[in-house]
Image (tube, helix red, strand yellow):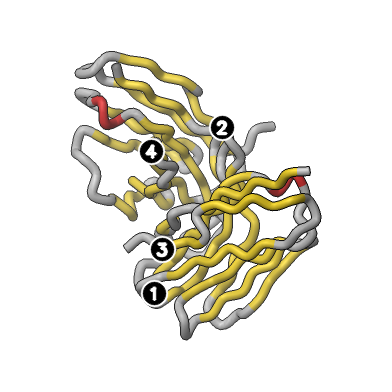
């Protein structure tokens, strides 16, 4: 059974479109994250939720909106996609906040044309 | 502000040792080490907490020097499976629950 899953794995879309990425974890963890990994492989945190509460909100364009319907799910909606949004987006989860192991999903490769 | 890792890249022959360093400009609360293989997700290796010094399993170990605000990852008798990009993730004092990942070190182990 996959611990942290994401859909879709690949997403190719045109500039200006709106798209969503879904994430689910079956580990019973309280905290979930979204990371962006760019073409230079830099891994940067975007958002984090703990028990459905937003606890980390980095300097990210407000075209990006996370939503956590419950502890096991964290979705990422992106409006008006731009070329610079092309990247791999990883979802992760951890048992708690702080110094806890983070388990990453397989990633979603987003390509904006 | 991103932790700086060195070296940026290293090529080893199987059986050789390597050290990867992670330096922070801020006081560290914990350091996490991850390995990412090409096209895959980062996979957790170990956490070092403030007050702890060294951890390890199998032939991979790490140290945490609070005074110098740095951590080092030691890979001994490297295997082909060690190839990948290694990232340190730093948790800074006062910003618990947020990991800031380092610049990455690409390691390739050859026969």
Tell me if residue A19 can be seen.
yes
Corner quadrant of residue B45 = bottom right
Q: Could you tell me which residue is drawn at 23 percent across and 49 percent down?
A: A59
User: Do the residues at pointers 2 and 4 share their chain?
Assistant: no
Please name the residue that numbered disc 4 is placed on.
A38
Sequence-wise first label, 1 or 2: 2
Q: Secondary structure at mark 3?
A: loop
Label 4: few (<14), some or many (≥20) within 10 Å? Answer: some
Please name the residue that numbered disc 1 is placed on.
B93
Q: Which circle, 1 or 4, is nearer the viewer?
A: 4
Q: CA distance from mark 4 to mark 3?
A: 17 Å
Q: Chain of mark 3?
A: B
Where is residue B31 shown, x and y percent of the image? 52, 67
Q: Do the residues under discs 4 and 3 have CB atoms within 8 angstroms?
A: no
Label 3: few (<14), some or many (≥20) within 10 Å? Answer: many
On screen, B66 above or below A69? below
Where is residue A78 shown, x and y percent of the image? 28, 28
The label number, if any, that marks residue B39 in the structure image: 2
The label number, if any, that marks residue A66 in the structure image: none
User: Do the residues at pointers 3 and 2 share their chain?
Assistant: yes
Q: Chain of mark 1?
A: B
Q: CA distance from mark 1 to mark 3?
A: 14 Å
Q: Secondary structure at mark 1?
A: loop
Please name the residue that numbered disc 3 is placed on.
B3
Q: Chain of mark 4?
A: A
Q: Quadrant of the C terminus of chain A?
A: top left
Q: Do the residues under discs 2 and 4 have CB atoms within 8 angstroms?
A: no
Residue nearer the viewer, A99 or B31: B31
């Amino acid at each position: 059974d996959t611990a942290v899953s994401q859909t879709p794995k690949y997403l190719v879309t045109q500039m200006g479109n709106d798209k969503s990425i879904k994430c689910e974890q079956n580990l019973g963890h309280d905290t979930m994250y979204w990371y962006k990994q760019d073409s230079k492989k830099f891994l940067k945190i975007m958002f984090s939720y703990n028990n459905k509460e937003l606890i980390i909100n980095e300097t990210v364009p407000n075209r990006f909106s996370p939503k956590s319907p419950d502890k096991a799910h964290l979705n990422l909606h992106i409006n008006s996609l731009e070329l610079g949004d092309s990247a791999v987006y990883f979802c992760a989860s951890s048992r708690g906040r702080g110094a806890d192991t983070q388990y990453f999903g397989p990633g979603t490769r987003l390509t904006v044309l | 502000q991103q932790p700086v890792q060195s070296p940026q890249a290293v090529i080893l022959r199987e059986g050789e040792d390597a050290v990867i360093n992670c330096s922070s400009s801020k006081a560290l609360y914990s350091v996490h080490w991850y390995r990412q293989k090409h096209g895959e997700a980062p996979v957790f290796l170990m956490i070092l907490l403030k007050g702890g010094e060294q951890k390890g399993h199998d032939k991979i170990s790490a140290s945490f020097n609070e005074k110098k605000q740095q951590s080092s990852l030691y890979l001994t008798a490297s295997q082909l499976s060690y190839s990948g990009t290694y990232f340190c993730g730093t948790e800074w004092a006062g910003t618990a629950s947020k990991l800031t990942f380092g610049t990455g070190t690409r390691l390739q182990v050859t026969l």
